Image (spheres, coloured by chain):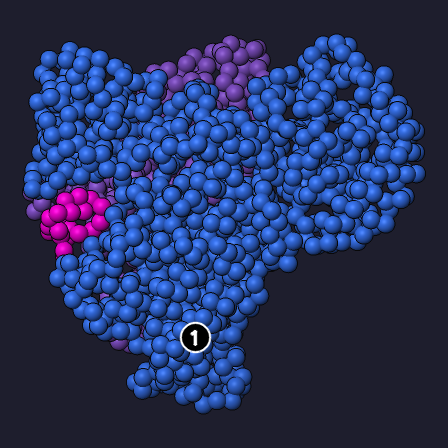
Amino acid sequence: MTLRKAYDDSLSIAKHFCHNGCVRCVPTIFAFVACSSIAATAYREEKVDFDREVRPILVANCYMCHGPHDEARKAGLRFDSHAGATAILRNGRHAIVPFNLDQSEILQRIAQTDIEQRMPPAGHDPLTPAQIATLRKWIQEGAVYTPPSAFQALRQTPPPNVKDQTWCESEIDRFVLATRERIGLAAPKTDLEPAALLRKLSFDVRGLPPDEQDVRAYSAQPTPANYHAIVDRYFADSAYGERWGRHWLDLARYAETLGHEFDYEMPDAWRYRDYVIDAMNHDLPLDQFVTEQIAGDLLPPRAAMNLPNVAPIATAWWFLGPAVHAPIDVRQDEADRIAGSIDVLGRSFFGLTVACARCHDHKFDPIPTADFYSLSGVVRNTRRVSGFVDTDPRAAGFLLSAIEAFNATQRSSDVDTNILATLRTRPEGQFLAVKAIDDLFDDGESWSVSGPAFAQGANNNRVISSPTAQSGTINSAKLDPRLVGSARSTTTTIDHRYLHIRLSGSDAIVRVIIDNYWLDERNALLFEGLLRRLPHQDPPGEWRTETLDLVRFKGERMYIELIDEGGGSIEVDWIAASDEPAPPDSESWDIDRISDAALAVDVASRTAAQDAIENLVACTAPMRAMIAEEGGNQDEPIHIRGASNSLGQAIPRARLQMLGAQSAETVEGSGRIALAQLLTDEKNPFLWRTTANRVWLKLFGRGIVETPDDFGQLGTPPWSAELLDALALQLMRERSIKSLIRTVVRSHAYRAAADSGESPSMAWSPLSVRRLDAESIRDSMLFASSRLDRTVGGASVPAYLTNHMQGRGRPGESGPVDGSGRRSLYLAVRRNFLDPFLQAFDAPVPSVTCGRRHSSNVPAQSLALMNSDLVRTISEHWAKQIVGEPESDKSRIESMWYALFSRPPRSDESEMALQFLDSERKLNSNTTDLLSRDRVAYAALAQSLFATKEFIFLR
Amino acid sequence: MSHQPHHHCGRFRATPLTRREMLSAVGGGFGMLAFSALFGRNSIASSPLSDGRALLAPHIPARARSVIFLYMDGGPSQVDTFDPKPRLVDLDGKPFPMALSPTQFNNNGATLASPWKFARHGQSGLEVSELFPHVAKLSDELCVIRSMTSDFAEHTNANYFLHTGSSIAGRPSMGAWSSYGLGSDNQNLPGFVVIDGGLIPPGGLDCFSAGFLPARYQGSVILPQAEAMANATLQESHDSQQRKRALIAQLDSQYAHETNSEAVESAIRNHELAYRMQSSVPELAAIDGESDETKALYGFEAPDATTRIYARECCLARRLVDRGVRFVEVTCPRTIGDRWDQHDNLRAGHEANARAVDQPIAALLTDLRRRGLLDSTLVVWAAEFGRTPFAQGTNGRDHNPFGFTIWMAGGGVRAGTVIGSTDEFGYRAVDKPYKIHDLHATMMHLLGVDHHRLTFRSGGRDMRLTDVHGELITDAIA
């Protein structure tokens, strides 16, 4: 088979299979057809690999009518399982009889020349002879259905026997050496020098170079005990969490602006970054870390970062993607946002391109479209809210006592109850199609709240029972006007044009959120009037009705949000939907008719609870953070061919067919808890295997699977599946990333030096060099020059803007050139204004999950090292530090070498540097100020050393 | 290399084959090109051609060596520039007679006739409005496509789509694809250069991104001013830098020897390129050294400041293609009218924008032609979409992706022609509707690249500029 033919075949496969123009798989299908056929002709003696050779043929040619879709299935035949393919057919025959070519009807049908009889049927291209040959051979060999390797359970394999036992110090070593011996290679001959090893370890664990004294001490006594002690010390350094937290941020496509046209800010995004650093530093168990990303708002409180409950902050993970302002089709926009989240989820936690199943079943991996929509349902029932997180550990207790005291005094008020009784008798049928709050929002019983202002019953971020039951209103000032908080209704479908909201208040917000679209708070285009800021009013008691026109959004889903950010108040009595622009006449049942009397009672009885409330108010105010909240429990229908206006069967939330059979129980709420359980289930290998591989990749510069975000059919296979599973099993047992890193860096393999010219692809081999990543380069320049500010966390340093960084959304002012000496992960990540220095060295563009960074080689890198403001500024700073110490040139040079290369200069290098300094000084010999002459010379030397390759590469 | 027979598909998954092995495996012919395209990054990473090309030779004979993409930020109105619609005059002020699709602002007014008169020009008799008096004189060089469409009515999505073939951020720009496929004919300058006149398109620098391609292919933004490129201007004396360079070279050669690593060697080569760029970029940017006649032609001394900016941009663009740069994009200067995006005050805004670009564009075509460069340069004039033939409010036009005009000129283009048409009101493309993917396919074709066959493996798929789409606009090809 020629490749030309293979290409044509792929084109036709793709053309007839993909309905939606998602024939984007042509090239990949091509590759498969080409490879399958080369395989079929060249390597006859090998058994056919179902996963790599057969499944693609079945997927592309047969699944459309004989696959997992119940509705589409013809003749009751399915080829997506062994049982289905070998079942008895209506004509009494079998599509496939293992080992039996004659009785396997499929072979007759695909080889038919009569187009009436042929499969695939008329209108579709026939299989190629090579494909037919592959299927024949597969059936002859027993038609075995093997699950794809990524889906196979973790397997414990005893470490293999190797010839060179002496080289092996750990199980890892035996696994890696076995891969080498298999292809005739011996163990690496040499180990890294102690100094080079320490430099690598320090960058790998902390993203910073080692201290000079550590290098000296360890070089003098490179014992295992000393090495282990340094490893432990590095783990205890907060720089560890910064380094490994940044790796996670690469996966989460972390940024602090929304990109798109105006690059609006996400003001609280950095709290997520700090959460991640903190979680890494505390070595939060992996399953808990993952569960908190998915559903931290639904977990019992976990204290950290000086916060009584840090877990909800993790849920910002869902919302870190870019966002579109003024989408013309808000439902489609929501679907796109959801797809973005699912893409990140799939790559980060499964190592699979789950989002490929948005329009059709995954072409190569067993991921049905239904699974995409099972996840869609989870995301769609999850809200992005600007929530309030407790900062004061006492606050929750005080709130509880305040509520109890308050409720006790309320219950003693007969007057109040009587008035409420009349209030709740609302007329029916008075106003056509009016729905009052009770009907619209589930009896008004299940508003969810965040912060103390609306919370009369329970913890933060919990759905509370009946905030309206006592007074007939939702009121942010009920306990005290000084409290902050927000409240959200349940989700409902818009079936009337107008929404009338009866309210009173001052300096607060009432808004309608449609299809979870929230960007109208930054740009109201197309969503005018859906967010109302109540102007300052003194006193705030006057009642009025706000009417919102939802004409463009009929049929969409919406909820109502009330926000009191402190200092204001908002009270809502009723909300009605109608098709009339004028609000209903509510005189007979408005609360304001009698509110004076009701409030008089309230105010009088409230004094008893005042102490508790004062305690609460005296607590540190809750902080705002972008977090997730439950938003319903509706299953999402399949969007046929990815179109949000063409809906199919509803798919249960958090029930993934790709994980095999699961319980039929309905999941609670959005299903995020259930999803987190699936992800962290020990039966499912994905999280453990992909994470173990990520750890290995970051420590060796090359993964065991080289495509860390794609373990599927189009990724690369592991060069040692046994080693990968051994590491994954350790991770699953211990849940500790730190412990896994410790295991790896203690192996002999980690210490091994590269043998020149060796780069086998299906065996382990140390790399000769690895370029430092962008952050490490910048951070170690700061470190060398003593400019590094080791403060952990906090709001980001504003981006330094050059003349060449233009465009909409450019901040008014530039940040400091050296980022105030902060580590690179604290520089603001603005999607449309990414730091050009970090970009040049391949910091990721935060649009998709990035498990492996490029290590490119572009002139912009050298230009930045030669001429950028950043490098010049740091060089000058360093020079100032150097000449400030009364040392000889020689010892200064030695310190510089240690700072950048973690070793002393050789004598010829020292001589070169001295000569360089001398000629620099001579050039400026007319300068009488010796100190400043020295400074210029040392700045030039510093900048030269920054531009050396040894500085930006690791051994 | 350890090419293991039992890993028959390994050649597809990893990098076990050398170029030589690949060639012998497929027996030449179709082989090399397909493989370098198919194996994308792998073949490049394992054995980079010195100029970073993915293709050893064009797939098809190249008609153009370079592209100048004149990006008309915001979307000029087709019915006011190159697509005259007399019916609009009849119905001016009356209700628009066709069914409307949702628009960006949903503030749709009455039919709005063009405030500008059209006249026929040149032998081709091309109809051009009085907004473009200079370009009109070059009508016989233009191939006007009146039936372009886009899938997006909103700037940013439409811009990503126009630039990358996808509406979301993070995909490689067409300039990145071009230099990935064909490399650069100038080893001292980047292969993809964006000249920033003051308006970076909505979507920001992601419009010029290398996406998942290696960073070397991303657009380098230069400004039409003395310091054209970031960090490319020497910040110290030549002597001073030479001494640094010597020291660095000494230290590096020792390290290269110790490590014996291709990565280190290539970083050293790259440092030398950066060093050379410190001369080549200022030399490129020294446009004031052009002759007085040339400067006057472009409009260096034009009365309008925005014309003067765009004149320098167009002149720089010519200098870039003259130096072998593969793909040049020219963005608009900031005028009173907020680019071509006239949601109101159509007349004042379009006049300001046309005034900024008309003379410099005509000068660019003229200058390329007289220097013999027009035959090898594909000039494309395009925006992310057009505008509605009915009013937004009373005197503006909203976004219209359903039918709008672009034009091409130069290498391989059938000059003096009009292709396709919109309906009688200029609202929707009716005859030969084309998609942005078709434009991309055609541009790549003229550069000698089969858009199907230039791919790069990313995220489990072999990606390409045209995704799974793209038909050649054959009428546009000479």
Any part of residue B104 in sight? yes
Q: Residue A491: x, y in percent? A: 61, 27
B18 in the magenta segment = yes
Foreground of the two, A628 or B222: A628
Judging by the rendered image, the residue that carries numbered circle 1 is A229
- B412 over A281 or under it: above or below: above
Amino acid type, residue under disc 1 in the picture:
Ala
- What residue appears at the point 32 percent right and 44 percent down from the top-left corner? A153
Q: Colour of chain B?
A: purple
Magenta stretch, residue numbers = B1-21
Drawn side of residue A665 relative to residue A91, left or right? right
User: In the image, which lettered chain appears blue?
Assistant: A
Prevalent SS, magenta region: loop
Foreground of the two, A394 or A100: A100
Q: Residue A283: x, y in percent? A: 49, 59
Query: Element at badge 1?
Result: helix
- What residue appears at the point 61 percent right and 55 percent down from the top-left corner? A303
